[in-house]
């Protein structure tokens, strides 16, 4: 996954150990039960966000 991350354009962000998404495709961050968070993409798909990835994702979305 790290190798793929290096090959993709810089507007992709790793949100989970299994998912890389383009930041422009993210509609919103969705808080779920407990401390779980997901992203909702423009097409309505929801993907989990790893807890360790959340601060980086928030920072990238603010930029």
Image: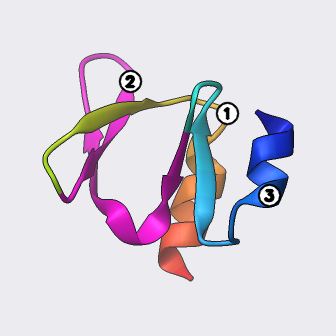
Which label's residue is closer to the chain start, 2 or 3?
A: 3
Foreground residue among 20 and 63: 20
Tag 3, which secondary structure?
helix
Judged left or right of residue 36, residue 50 is: right
- Magenta stretch holds residue 18: no
Quarter-of-image position of residue 26:
bottom left
Q: In this rendering, is residue 29 above or below 17?
A: below
Q: Position of residue 33 (x, y in %)?
A: 24, 18
CA separation in Å, label 2 and label 1: 11 Å
List the residue tagged with mark 2: 36
CA separation in Å, label 3 and label 1: 22 Å
Q: Position of residue 54 (x, y in %)?
A: 56, 44
List the residue tagged with mark 3: 7
Residue at position x 49%, y 70% in the image = 61
Q: Give the mark toward the camera: 3 or 1.
A: 3
The answer to whether the residue labelled 3 contacts the one labelled 1, judged by CB atoms less than 8 Å apart, is: no
Foreground residue among 6 and 30: 6
CA separation in Å, label 2 and label 3: 29 Å
Q: Give the mark toward the camera: 2 or 3.
A: 3
List the residue tagged with mark 1: 52
Quick one: quadrant of the C terminus?
bottom right
Judged left or right of residue 9, residue 36 is: left
- The magenta stretch spans which residues? 20-42
């Amino acid at each position: 996954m790290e190798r793929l991350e290096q090959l993709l354009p810089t507007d992709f962000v790793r949100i989970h150990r299994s998912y890389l998404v383009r930041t422009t495709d993210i509609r919103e961050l969705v808080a779920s039960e407990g401390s779980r968070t997901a992203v909702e993409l423009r097409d309505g798909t929801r993907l989990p966000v790893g807890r360790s990835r959340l601060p980086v994702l928030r920072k990238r979305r603010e930029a």
